[in-house]
Amino acid sequence: MTVLSASGLVKSYGGVKAVRGVDLRVDAGELLALIGPNGAGKSTCFNMLMGQIAPDAGRVELLGADITGQAPRRIWRQGVGRTFQITATFASMLVRENVQTALMSRHRRLGNLFLSATKLYAEGALALLERVGMADQAERPCSVLAYGDLKRVELAMALANDPKLLLMDEPTAGMAPTERQAMMALVAKLARESRIAVLFTEHDMDAVFTHADRIVVLNRGRVIAEGEPADVRADELVQRVYLGGGTMFGHV
Amino acid sequence: MDFSSIVVQFLNGLAGASSLFLVAAGLSLIFGVTRVVNFAHGSFYMLGLFLAYSLAGRFGGTPTGFWISLLVSALVVGVVGALVEIVILRRTYRSPELFQLLATFAVVLVIKDVALAIWGADSLLGRRAPGLSGSFQFFGKVIPAYDLVLIAAGPVVLGLLWLIVRRTRFGRLVRAATQDREMVGALGVNEAWLFTGVFFLGSFLAGLGGAIVLPREPANLSLDIAVIADAFVVVVVGGMGSLPGAYLAALLIAEVKALCIAIGDVSMFGYTVSFSRLTLVVEFVVMAVVLVVRPYGLLGRPSATPRAQVAIMAASRPPRGRWILLVIAVLAVAPLLIDRYSIVLLNDVLVFALFAASLHFFMGTGGMISFGHAAYFGIGAYAAALLLKRAGLQMEVALTLAPVAGGIAALFFGWFCVRLSGVYLAMLTLAFAQIAWSIAYQWDALTGGSNGMVGVWPAAWLADKAAFYWLTLGVTVVGVLWLWRMASSPFGYGLRAGRDSPLRAEALGIDVRRQQWFTFGVVGAVAAAAGALYAFSKGSISPDVMGIQRSVDALVMVLLGGVHSLVGPLVGAAVLTWLQDEIIRDTEYWRGLLGLAILALVLLLPQGLAGARDLWRRKPA
Ligand SMILES: Nc1ncnc2c1ncn2[C@@H]1O[C@H](COP(=O)(O)OP(=O)(O)O)[C@@H](O)[C@H]1O
Ligand SMILES: [Mg+2]
């Protein structure tokens, strides 16, 4: 079942054509890796899918419904969770409270001015933290966490709405190699268990080739290859542009 | 209104625009490079005008002497600005941005009293420029010759600044720093030197703006606040960091004002609308309109947008229940033990504690800055007075409805404000507060104008000072506890989420703008409750209840007590109210002393009074 399908996405910043006509499709339970050199347009694609920026052209569909140009909060309500390249969490809150806030939002409780929220959805939050392996750090302030742990908190928050689609922009950036494999294994497990479609970008090729079901290679805003990991690895153009001798187009 | 008077007012507007532009350009430069919102900029203008008055009065008999006097005045102000940067602000760059604001407020207070000591409280009109004191005829109207100098001054200075910024090394650094702070560090520039230089230049421009209006405007002590409000408006309308934008905005505002004067009184449908009296409101209306249409100002760009967020604070928890009960108990029995005067003072403390707590919620939990919080306090006070005196309602009913009025007004203002963020949002709150003030000041028939309203007394059962005090205590306790509860309510979590990370909040389905909008309504209602209590406790009100000074007081209370602590605003309100009462009695220079006290505090205790406790705790360890 196709969860996400995007067609003809275009975005330019002034003179810079960041994305020039990208098509993407992700199925339920599938891990799709979007790879490409720095500046290829990966983050820009993510931002268009989740509504942080509006595409100049193109269309985004979630389970067949058009969500192009909708506000991120609307898209989230329809079942899209996201993690950011630079982690975004609520620094003044405890880890548990971060997830509680996500749950309060899901249940539309944020208009309540009188109730004490300290216990609200605490159990649900702990359960989510358990799933990402962060339950033991639930009572720590988010501001003191290691970077890799923050990424897990973000994941727990993204899962709070039982998403049908997860968008993960560099989910393992800033992590140690062993940590990376563990994180990707976790994501893969969640995707299989809950039939979540996952679209992620990643620089660590080991992680990509181990866990992705399919790979889309982006360069200078265009898809240059697409397919199963083995095919992509064998693709000559990809070899040259990206995987080969380390030469990259565009920015380094 | 005829054609010639429109032309004359147009020229008048051009002349007015130049001085406004000089001040605003300086403010914009300083902000662009150092990210300091310099509240003392209006004071620099005032100082320039006073200095020019004295110097030109002594040496200005000849044209050369006159112009040199003006230039020297501006240079002296530039040096004062550089000193303020070196001695005070340099120590605050690592503190939360709001501390720099507080420090510049303190400088405002100090300069005001220094000026009071040197030049006295009366308005002083300076010497005419030798050789330019005449006037000429234009379409049958008289135009002062000096206005031509003023008209030329704006574009000339704009041109010179453009050359400096575009063609010199200093200018290149200024541009680099304005666009990208890190880049300056990367270039290996000595930031301290750059900042001092920019402060010198910016203050010099403010001083010059003041000095050149010498033959036209009398120097007086209220110019500082009036000019800073104008300059803020110009900078925001023009776009932060844009010099041509500042000139365009100064021109726009000066011309719209001049047009209002030219139109004068207009009779419509049996009412007479006095446009000439609308000048106070009109610049703020222009600003509100421009900001809603172009959130970054006429020529501003989003990248130069200041973040100006309250430093993210730890989720501070309220004190333990038994401490709260103890404090309430002590406050409840206090009237039995103290004299009448002290009861009244304590009543004021409670009223301002509630007011400051509402601002604290807005800033601390909401992460927004308000430069115009007095608007809601004042609307509460006026609503109470109007409902009592004009609508003839009972005092109890008026007191109950006042917060509703404040909340509705705040929702109205907030609807515009939440479309912006950071300093822009703060400026818009100031604009709305000034509009509210102007309405109260000018609508004689309804509000009693500058005299305000008298006879706003509470019901008979509250006539006794102690009885009214207990009412105040009750309302304040309920209000403060509700604000504290709200900080940990689902609403509070949603609000903090939007403050900590708008990106993440939106990606979790949180409508950040709506949370902020409701916050306006909530704090507006609470502040209005405080304002209504204030009105009934004094028995009279005047537009001062919502003047800029009161907004500043509220900010000082919050910052004095410490943004990081829930009890901070309460402590700050108590200390400031008590201090004002103490030093007003003993000296006419209480503002200056208060300013020095604030400076000492900012430099020694950057976490506020409530933060001193932590310092104390940490020390022995
Ligand atoms: N907000 C922006 N303004 C201007 N250019 C941008 C902006 N965001 C991204 N770009 C440009 O768009 C291109 C793609 O960027 P991005 O999507 O972040 O790439 P990736 O995530 O693949 O590294 C780059 O050339 C980048 O410089
Ligand atoms: Mg990226």
Image (cartoon, coloured by chain):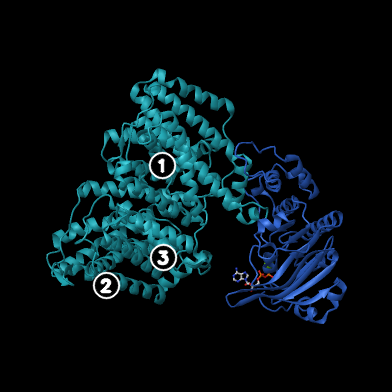
**What letter labels the chain drawn in cyan?**
B
- Identify residue type, mark 2: Ala
Tag 1's secondary structure? helix
Image mark 3: chain: B
N-terminal-most mark, 3 or 2:
2
Q: Nearer the viewer, mark 3 or mark 1?
A: 1
At x 33%, y 73%, the residue is: B160
Please state which of residues B582 and A26 is positioned toward the viewer in this rendering.
Answer: A26
At x 62%, y 46%, the residue is: B494
N-terminal-most mark, 3 or 1:
3
Please state which of residues B235 and B278 is positioned toward the viewer in this rendering.
Answer: B278
Query: Which residue corresponds to mark 3?
Result: B238
Image mark 1: chain: B
- Identify residue type, mark 1: Ile
Residue B304 in picture, x, y percent from top left? 49, 64
Categorize mark 3 by other alpha carbons within 10 Å: few (<14), some (14-19), many (20+). Answer: many
- Identify residue type, mark 3: Gly
Q: Does the residue labelled 2 lie within 8 Å of ligand 1?
A: no
Please state which of residues A122 and B71 is positioned toward the viewer in this rendering.
Answer: A122
